[in-house]
Each structure stands twice: as C-alpha cells, then as structure tokens.
Image: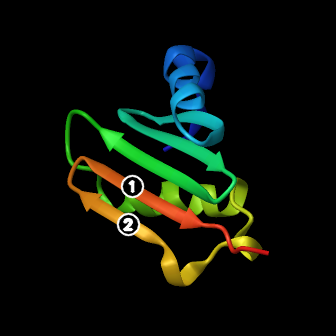
Amino acid sequence: MKIINVTNNFRHLVDEQLRNTDALTVEVYSAGNTTAIFTTAATHYELLVTNKHRAIRLDERERIQNFFLKKRLDESIIDVKNISIIDEPKMLEISYPILRT
C-alpha cells in the first residue's frame, strides 16, 4: 500500500480547515480507499484516517500511523502521556499534543 499526497485534489477541504480551525497546515493523503488527513496546529498534531467503504484494517492503521510518526511528526515535542485516540471501524482520529516550552 502506497501513501500518496493528494492535497491538491482537496483544495476546498484544506481551505475550510485553515479558515475554520486552529490548523496551520493541512495535508491529505490517499492509500487506496483509505484517506488520511494530517493537520498541524500550534498546540497539537492531528491525524484522521477514514474509509467510507469498509472498516480500516489493523495493518492499515499501523502502516499509516507509522508513516506519519516517521515522516511528519516531531516526536521529540509530543506529549505522549496525553495522546487522544478515537478508534471506530471506519475512522481513526489521533491527536498528538505538543509539549509546552
């Protein structure tokens, strides 16, 4: 499964997120029918993974989460004690709070 940046195909979503939330950046990625939206804000990182057609498989969840941990997150500033996870069959949302300096 390849994870491909498709942010340019979701201009409206990105614009709305930037306008209506505390997001500083919004990126959209595709892994087949599974879509991942990665957001950075001053106080947290946010990862939302969805699939409209079926439940997200465990291996997909792990692969996508690992991709973002390695490629997009600065793990040295994440408050690992306060990570928030909402885990539903067709949706996974993880909020990674940033340590206050």
Q: Secondary structure at mark 1?
A: strand
The residue under the point 49% across, 22% down is 13
Quarter of the figure with the C terminus = bottom right
Q: Residue at x 69, y 74 (%)?
A: 99
Whether residue 11 is situated above or below residue 88 in the rendered picture? above
| Observer-nearest of 7 and 14 | 14
Mark 1 residue crowding within 10 angstroms, few (<14) / some (14–19) / many (20+): some
For marks 1 and 2, the one nearer the N-term is: 2
Taking the spot 44% from the left edge, 60% from the top edge, the residue there is 94
- Residue 77 location (% of width, % of height): 73, 72
> Which of the pair 99/75 is nearer the observer?
99
Q: Is residue 20 above or below residue 100?
A: above
Give the structural element (helix, strand or loop) at label 2. strand
The circle drawn on residue 61 is none
Viewed as shown, does residue 90 lie left or right of 43? Answer: left
Image coloring type: rainbow
Which residue is at a point 69% across and 62% down the rendered structure image?
70
From the image, tell me which residue sits under label 2. Answer: 85
What amino acid does circle 1 point to?
Glu
Residue at mark 1 to residue at mark 2: CA–CA distance: 6 Å
CA neighbours of label 2 inside 10 A, class few (<14), some (14 to 19), many (20+)? few
Q: Quadrant of residue 53?
A: top left
Residue tagged by mark 1?
93
Extreme residue in the bottom direction: 81
28 vs 100, left or right, is left
Q: Is residue 88 above or below residue 4?
A: below
Amino acid at circle 2: Ile
Q: Position of residue 93 (x, y in %)?
A: 39, 55
In this figure, what is the number of numbered marks? 2
Q: What x and y, as percent, mark residue 62?
A: 45, 64
Q: Quadrant of residue 27?
A: top right
The answer to whether marks 1 and 2 mark residues whose Cβ atoms lie closer than 8 Å is yes
